[in-house]
Each structure stands twice: as structure tokens, then as C-alpha cells.
Amino acid sequence: MGDILREPALFVGEIDAEFDLMLPPSSGEEYIKRVVIEAQQCDDVVVAENIKARIRTPMVAVKPLAGCVEAPASMVPTLDWQQCQLADFSSVRLEIDRIKHNLQNAEGRRRLRQTVLPDADDQVGWLEYICNMRPLLGLVLNMNQPLIEQVLEHLVEAVEEKGLISQPYGGWIYALLATLELPLNPDTCSCLRSLARTCSIIRASMTEENAKDVTALNLFICLVARYFRQMDLVDL
């Protein structure tokens, strides 16, 4: 097999050693002969010179994503409490699945048409809307998944900026989490992880005086870590 591969593909005949390579070829056969001569002048193996001064280490800016910040001992949720929250959340999602089709009736569609929603990319508009409108189940269920994911991202960014979860934000986050379809896409998964990490940072900065506000933070960390299977963020 190796000998066959070494056989010339084209017959070029005798090659005159006095071939003048400076003159243009006058025929196709002469052109092929020039190619053969130039190939014979090339080394069988060529090794490039390794000039270390020209080799640069690639500079890639990588922002590490840390896990959740450990909670103060007095604010760590018990395992029983976390399991109760998971059971309640699972029940809510099952109920949502049961009634989802009932909300597609004429009354539900009419309410949705009468509700003017901000554009999906309008973060300021959505945050103002959320502060003035409690998360009606029918409204949230009639939002498509891309809109649910986008609004959730707006809320998580706002929580990161403000360093707290207000009551309107908390209610909407819970409602949006309850209507998220599985499996999560990578962007939404990253958004949920950011939510859990931010909650843990806020929790770690709390004092005993405002420890009562830790419940919502523990809840969202629990749901992201245990229900949505981001187990490296779990409170043990």
C-alpha cells in the first residue's frame, strides 16, 4: 500500500537539469516539471525554530463564581425546615400544573389582554410594575417562559444592586420560580445560582436585630440548591 502511494500521479518524462526556472512555462508538461524540480529542492522534514520570546501566554479574564457564603450559626436553617419548604413548593408546582389549563379559558385570556405589561427588556418598567402589582397566579401563568426567565433575571439583578429582598420582590421571585419549566436552560440556571449566592451574602451581613428577615433568604437558597439541584450551594 505504501509503495502505491509513492508512485507519481502524473508522468512527466525526462527532466532537463538545465531547466531555467526564471522563464515562464510554455506548456502544461513544462509546468509540471517545474513543480517536480521545486519539490526536490525542499527538505523532507522542516522544523520551525522555537523562539520563546515570540510566545506569549494568553491572557484570559476569568471571573470565578464562588459558592454561597456560610451562614451565621444562629441563621442556619434546619434540615427539617428545608424539607418542609421543599414539600410546600412541590405542592404549589403540582397545583399550578393542575390548574394551568383552566386558566386558558376566555376569562383568563380577557384579563391578560386587559393587562398592559412592560416590554421584556424594560427592567425599570418591570420593577415599577412589580412594586405596584402583587403576583396574580393567572397573570404569571399566562406569561410565556422566555418572559418569566427575563423578569426573574431583572429581579435578581435588582436584588444584587440593592442588597436586600423587599416584600414585592420576594413574592414575585417565588411565583416565577414556581412557574419555571424544567430542565433549566444555562442562562436561567446561572441566574438562580446568582440569586442563591446573593441571598447568602445578604444573610451573612445580618445582625441578630434583623435576623427575622432571614427566612426569605433561606427559602430561596434552599429552593435553588435542593429543588433546582444546585447542590454545591446547599445549606448543610
Image (cartoon, grey):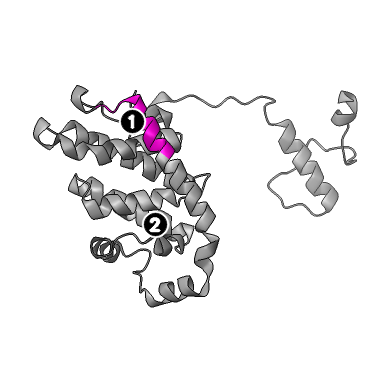
Q: Residue at x 41, y 42 (%)?
A: 89
Q: Is residue 182 left or right of residue 73?
A: right
Marks 2/1: CA–CA distance: 30 Å
Q: Is residue 24 left or right of residue 122?
A: right
Q: Residue 181 lies in magenta, yes or no?
A: no
Q: Residue at x 84, y 38 (%)?
A: 15
**Closer to us: 99 or 76:** 99
Q: Residue at x 25, y 55 (%)?
A: 168
Residue 33 location, x and y as percent? 81, 42
Circle on res. 81: 1
Q: Amino acid at mark 1?
A: Trp
Q: For numbered disc 1, what is the local secondary structure?
A: helix
Q: Would you say the magenta stretch is mainly helix, strand or loop?
A: helix
**Closer to us: 180 or 90:** 90
Residue 71 location, x and y as percent? 23, 27
Q: Amino acid at mark 2?
A: Gln
Q: Residue at x 70, y 31 (%)?
A: 41
* First to last magenta residue range: 76-87
First in residue order: circle 2 vs circle 1: 1
In this orientation, does residue 57 appear?
no
Quadrant assignment for the N terminus: top right
In this orientation, does residue 192 appear?
yes
Q: Is residue 211 above or below residue 126?
A: above
Q: For numbered disc 2, what is the local secondary structure?
A: helix
Circle on res. 150: 2
* Quadrant in the picture for residue 84: top left
Disc 1: CA contacts within 10 A as few (<14), some (14-19) or many (>=20): few
